[in-house]
Image (cartoon, rainbow, N blue to C red):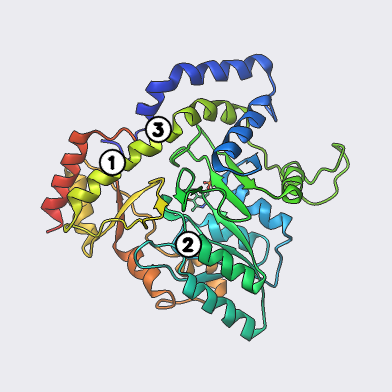
Amino acid sequence: MQFIDLKAQQDRIRDKIEANIRKVLDHGQYVMGPEIKELEQRLADYAGTRHAIGVSSGTDALLMPLMAWDVKPGDAVFTVAFTFIATAEVVQILGATPVFVDIDPETYNMDPIKLEEAILRVKSEGKLNPKLIIPVDLFGQPADYDEINAIAEKHGLLVLEDAAQGFGGVYKGKKAGSLAPVAATSFFPAKPLGAYGDGGMCFTDDDEMIGLLDSIRVHGQGSDKYNNVRIGINGRIDTLMAAILLPKFEIFQEEIELRQVVANRYSDQLKGLVKTPFVKDHNVSAWAQYSILHSERSKVMEGLKQEGIPTAIYYPKPLHLQDAFSNLGYGKGDLPVSERIAAEVFSIPMHPYLSKDDQDQIVEAIAKYAK
Ligand SMILES: *Cc1c(COP(=O)(O)O)cnc(C)c1O
């Protein structure tokens, strides 16, 4: 049994992927080839934004808007600690200061009440300039954007949606990727829309922002190639990745729906055995992960392993306790909800092609070891 079965998907569309790869080999535009523009247009249409720009990874999709906004030393960036390292790493790359906000104990997403408390605290301390909020759509479920965007507006802050796991999800009828002024997603192979290598995308309605991202993507280039008007990076997505993503995107919405079927079945059958995921009524999750809580996590995971069922922990150590952020001076107890969830959470196999038989086997094993 596989944690994520990429082969089942490949078997469905391998002909189309191979044909698209061949097309790229024929036209030879390996860098900034026509497939990139096509992918950008399709995904912008899907997300419901005016613009999308393909970039080299989800990490760079987070970094580049921060560069465009000139996030710099002295700036405070409010984000969560219960996430993948990249969310806060990009803040520190630019010398700015991540301010970690605790999460909601049900959704595991940023707690808007604690966000506002953190902003007020930073303002009253007067050492850092509150600049930006990065909510994460954790495990595929969009964060609380009405509340977060309202707090941002009230305090004059920017918002960047980390939709690396959320793309395909929906918040109050609007797609992830369109829930903040700028959003970032990832095409890492294991994400709901994954390529065969690294890639990512930024989404925005803002004409000025897309111009900045376009320039930053190619070393800060100006109107001609050798006139560099700002510091940028090599942030391009490869043509081959875009070519591979196009046929994958054709079946993406169907796959999101298949993930929902798998999630519903899990949630029905696991009720009472473990703490199952809570998705708000106004949300559709992209189900990047199906994550459950159990107070004796290692016992259950070990039992599942013996039955040949793979599991994974996202995330065993919240960022405020990671060595990479030790400069910030956080300690145990600073984010109690993040710490408790990190101690109990683990994820079980989740992908669109998980068979009913495999699922029954997983549920049975959990029932056996979770008692
Ligand atoms: C995967 C992920 C990223 C980074 O994406 P990469 O494409 O691996 O660079 C950022 N944030 C979150 C929440 C992620 O899950």
Which quarter of the image is occupied by the N terminus? top left
Q: Which of the marked residues, 1 or 2, is nearer the chain's N terminus?
A: 2
The residue drawn where x is 57% and y is 70% is 151
The answer to which quarter of the image holds residue 333 is bottom left
Q: Tag 3: residue type?
A: Glu
State the CA–CA distance, disc 1 to disc 2: 24 Å
The disc at residue 85 is none
Report crowding for label 3: few under 14, some 14 to 19, many 20 or more residues within 10 A (C-alpha): few
Q: Position of residue 28 (x, y in %)?
A: 68, 19
Q: Is residue 143 above or below residue 235?
A: below
Name the residue tied to disc 2.
Answer: 144
- In this rendered view, identify the residue nearer to me: 204 or 68: 204
Q: Which of the marked residues, 2 or 3, is nearer the chain's N terminus?
A: 2
Q: Is residue 259 visible?
A: yes
Name the residue tied to disc 1.
Answer: 262
The disc at residue 254 is 3
State the CA–CA distance, disc 3 to disc 1: 13 Å
- In this rendered view, identify the residue nearer to me: 25 or 204: 204
- SS class, disc 3: helix
Mark in the foreground, 1 or 2 = 2
- SS class, disc 1: helix
- Horizontal side, residue 256 vs residue 135: left or right: left
